[in-house]
Amino acid sequence: MIILSNIEKVYQTKTIETVALQQVNLAVPKGEFLSIMGPSGCGKSTLLNIMGLLDEPSSGTVSIGGQEIRSYKDKELAHIRNEKIGFVFQSYHLVNDLSVLDNVELPLLYRSGVSASERSKRAKIALEKVGLSARTKHFPNQLSGGQRQRVAIARALIGQPEIILADEPTGNLDSVMGEEIMNILLDLNRHDGTTIVMVTHDENMAKKTERLIRFFDGQQVSDAKVYANLQQV
Amino acid sequence: MLKNYIKIAWKVLLRRKFFTFISLFGISFTLMILMVVTSLFDHVFGPQTPERDTDRLLFVNSMKEQKEGGYTSSGPPSYYFLNKYVRTLKTPEQVSINSVFHQVNSYVNNRKLAIDIKFTDQAFWHVLDFKFIEGAPFGQQEVKSASRVAVINEHTRQQYFGDGPALGKEIVVDQVSYRVVGVVEDVPVLRLNSYADVWVPITLRSHEFNREGLRGGYFAILKAATPADVPKIKEEYAHMMKELERQKGEKDLQLYSFPATILENFARMVLGQGETSGLRILYAALTGITLLFILLPTINLVNINISRIMERSSEIGVRKAFGATSKTIIGQFIIENVFLTLLGGLLGFILAALVLWQINSSGLIVYADLSLNLRVFAIGLLLCLVFGFISGVYPAFKMSRLHAVEALKGGSK
């Protein structure tokens, strides 16, 4: 479960103060597939980065899997990200110099007590899940966009995180490939119970998820009711 | 983890061929120069056959007389001085007196040969550690009776007798005939205290022995019983010099002569003044030059590394997103850089070996036998690591501070 309370994010330069998020309160229950929509620059990605502990809010609190983040120390955040969160980015962000298998193994490099053979075994299982077990030795630039995104999903799920945060995962793909990626994410959510938060511009993709919230100018403009229901529970 | 880092380092090297070439060229060339220089330094100043016990050997190569009005003259000491004042010192275990080598002409089979000849006493063969291929050195009796016997080096044997043995045969050097009693391995010309082509008894120059000046054409080699005796010898020598100055009784006469290691003698010649040997200044200057020499390519490498790592900001972002701490990122880039420098080091070694081989075979330094010995290897390896560390740590630190979100934005696919 992810709980954001009174989150504000302000970017301050010498002359200008930009409010990216204001008074965001949001709870994402365990096992939910939530999509976030809104125009460019409305703060969706900032919100996702704050949920993923890649960015620090100016004020407010974040709680991940029942654990409230009290200090934003590099080592602690790195540990939580590694254990609990998987990321999928619009532009894949695969390491081009590493093979598909090595790319998928990457999160386990930072987890103690996982042997090389264990890493490789789990990477193969993850690749099988996304239908790419025949491509383990290929390099990212030998794959299509859809295949690259599937590698990225395999990388996000190898550490068996509770939460996957996907920032426009189908944004760079055509509709057929986008559909494929969406199906993999839906499958992960339904069968493995992984909580997924997805930022998207694509209304069709968003409609497939169980909950949709909209953002405008750094504020949540719809889905207030769902949030209220959760609070009552 | 390490395997993964090295794998990626290797990939990065292959991908950025131009950067790799510049980096490797800079590292290997710098290291090559450093290693050739250390090898030369070792060759000239380090323990080498026949001057092996360098921690127990002291050399007297110069006598400087400074008179009233600033008039100074200096040069090798005389036999008279060395025999009367140095050979009689109590603290050295052994003292050898030998002439400065000089070149004479000889004719073999109508061929003119330039031979470097040195006149030595019998102790010379004991304080130094020559490698005899044939025979043995001349003994006390032969020195006493001024016998015309000679120890020759391998090269001279080759010149006179081809591949055959030389023992017991006669050679004519500068129109004097000598019987060969021993053949030794070639000694490099930079070892001025022991080098020659032909060594003959010092008593063959006995007509020079009683010339009473302090300067002449002789060297002395003092051997201490233990390295701990070296300061005592220096002290006794200094005392003897003061006494000699007093005996001379000339107003404002100052005499400077010191028993010193080869390096100290070199430092005194180049930088020394009066009592101070200049060794500290020499070490400081050498360290400064070396640092400067390393610093320039390091700065260059740091710059190259920053741009090389900048290109990988997306990778840094991803690694951070998936749980790498800043420390791990620093570690990764340092490992990559050390790997790169070790690779450069390996190339540097090969280049250095080639250059040394070229120097040895070109005859640029007579009988030079420069090699990459273990000590030079260790220094080189250390330099590689320092190099890799220094040039990697700053860019790695800078990049590790990059915010994950910024890093991900900066990266392409």
Image: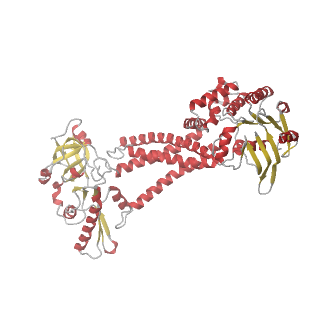
Quadrant in which the N terminus of chain A is drawn: top right
Rendered location of residue B283, percent (x, y)? 42, 58
Asked whether residue B318 is in view, the answer is: no
Residue B279 sits above or below residue B8 on the image? below
Quadrant in which the C terminus of chain A is drawn: top right
Q: Is residue B205 left or right of residue A91?
A: left
Which quadrant would residue B381 be assigned to in this image?
top left
Q: Residue at x 26, y 64 (%)?
A: B237
User: As drawn, which residue projects farthest toward the front?
Assistant: A233
Q: Residue at x 79, y 57 (%)?
A: A15
User: As drawn, which residue projects farthest toward the bottom?
Assistant: B251
Residue B227 sits above or below residue A199 on the image? below
Q: How is colour applied across the structure in the image? A: secondary structure
Rendered location of residue A56, percent (x, y)? 73, 48
Rendered location of residue A127, percent (x, y)? 67, 27
Residue B386 sits above or below residue B271 on the image? above
Q: How many marks?
A: 0
Q: Is residue A208 left or right of residue A63?
A: right
The residue nearer to you, when weighing B313 against B301, is: B313
Asked whether residue B112 is in view, the answer is: yes
Rendered location of residue B35, percent (x, y)? 43, 46
